[in-house]
Image (cartoon, rainbow, N blue to C red):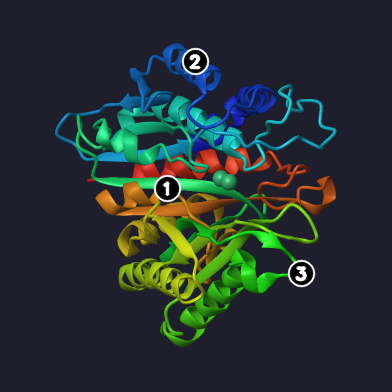
Amino acid sequence: MLETVKQLAEQIFDEIVEIRRTIHRHPELGFCEYKTSDLICSYLEKWGIPYKKGVAKTGVVGLIEVDPKAKTLLLRADMDALPVQEETDCDFKSQIDGCMHACGHDVHVAILLGVAAILMQMRDRLSCNVKLVFQPAEEGEGGAKPMIAEGVMENPHVDAAVGAHVINSVPAGKVLVKYGEVMASPDDFNMTIRGKGGHGAYPHECVDPISIGVQILNAWNALSARYTTPLEKHLISVNMFQAGTCFNVIPDDAYISGTVRTFDETVRQYLAKRMGEIAEQIAAVFGAECEFNFNYLYPPLLNDQAMTDAVRKSAEAILGKENVLEGVAPSMGGEDFAYFSKEVPATYIYYGSGNEKIGAVMPWHNAAFTIDEQCIKTGMIVMCQAALDFGEK
Ligand SMILES: [Zn+2]
Ligand SMILES: [Zn+2]
């Protein structure tokens, strides 16, 4: 079976690389992945795989069903690009100004299409149904939650899920697995401080929102360093502080926003509540008003032990033990695959995509981001093997 998977991956490789390049040339932002969605549907049709389109606007769900009573494994690829101007010189460079697949989601779509084609040909060897989920809008708004709300976990009922991402810090040909905490809750907050503007030489006649904002930022640092257990990973990152128009004018308002990253729900709730209280009280002490908003985004991404073990075993069988690495440190990044992993036992793995010789070294979201396309082969065979092993009698 291992050999068949490898042979089929080899046969289809060039076609899948072409698909990846086509998607790369035509990147689309979250919930606008119309062409990508059409392309996915055209291949599922070509390979005789039934699908549903328009799930959470631009999402597509394909289904390889072997037995309605069998278990169902969900495999997920995200589809969206980023508002980044591509700065590579590859010949399949983005043709859309200011839009680029700088996070490798083009690769994820291509790999999942390859997996679909291979598993369809090996259908009689599958002991589970495979739900192929092409999800819109991972970057920011999040397509996983609305897909679940529209019933992607049912008909047939999903028993487990696997998601994956390319990673340039791991060489192409290898995969990386992680246990437990993988990514944080990427919540955001914003705040407007309303003071009273006036002449910079007469601050006592004004209420300076900039100096009040600085006091609040300092207090938040203390909140993180002195009022939250150092044993729980978390961070408060202020990334916007906008105020003022002129060197001698105290502005009326200041605007501050940023992100809070946590893994623990208690810490998350505590920070959301205390950040707001501290901001309002400091603003009041100095005679300003303050409006603080905290937006809960994705849950933390946690990998299930048994699912991670299972996928690791499949990966080791098809790639060799030496090509399966175990990552230890979680990332403070966020990932809305977390919504699937909240519903069913799930694991999120990484396809090594780095290769110094061809310059595939840039980090995600960089304008010069490129990957070694050999990772497409690795991704296809690992996902296929995981599906073939899942629910095996
Ligand atoms: Zn990204
Ligand atoms: Zn990504």
- Residue nearest the observer in this picture, 140 or 223: 223
Q: Earlier in the sequence, mark 1 or mark 2?
A: 2
Q: Position of residue 61 (x, y in %)?
A: 36, 26
Left or right: residue 255 versus residue 305 is right
Assign ligand 2 to one image quadrant: top right
Q: Which amino acid, by three-letter code, is at mark 2?
A: Asp
Residue 374 figure quarter: top right
Queried on whether the Cβ of the residue with tag 1 lies below 8 angstroms from ligand 2, the answer reads: no
Q: Earlier in the sequence, mark 3 or mark 2?
A: 2
Q: Say which element carries label 3.
A: loop
Q: Which residue carries the number 3 mark?
A: 201
Query: Residue at the spot x=41%, y=36% of the render?
Result: 143
Q: Which amino acid, by three-letter code, is at mark 1?
A: Asp
Q: CA distance from mark 1 to mark 3?
A: 49 Å
Q: Label 2: how many residues lie within 10 Å, few (<14), some (14-19) or many (20+)?
A: some
Give the foreground label among 1 and 2.
1
Q: CA distance from mark 3 to mark 2?
A: 62 Å
As drawn, the label of residue 38 is 2
Q: Which amino acid, by three-letter code, is at mark 3?
A: Ala
Residue 205 figure quarter: bottom right
Left or right: residue 249 versus residue 336 is right
Instruction: Quarter of the image for the N terminus: give it.
Output: top left
Give the foreground label among 1 and 3.
3
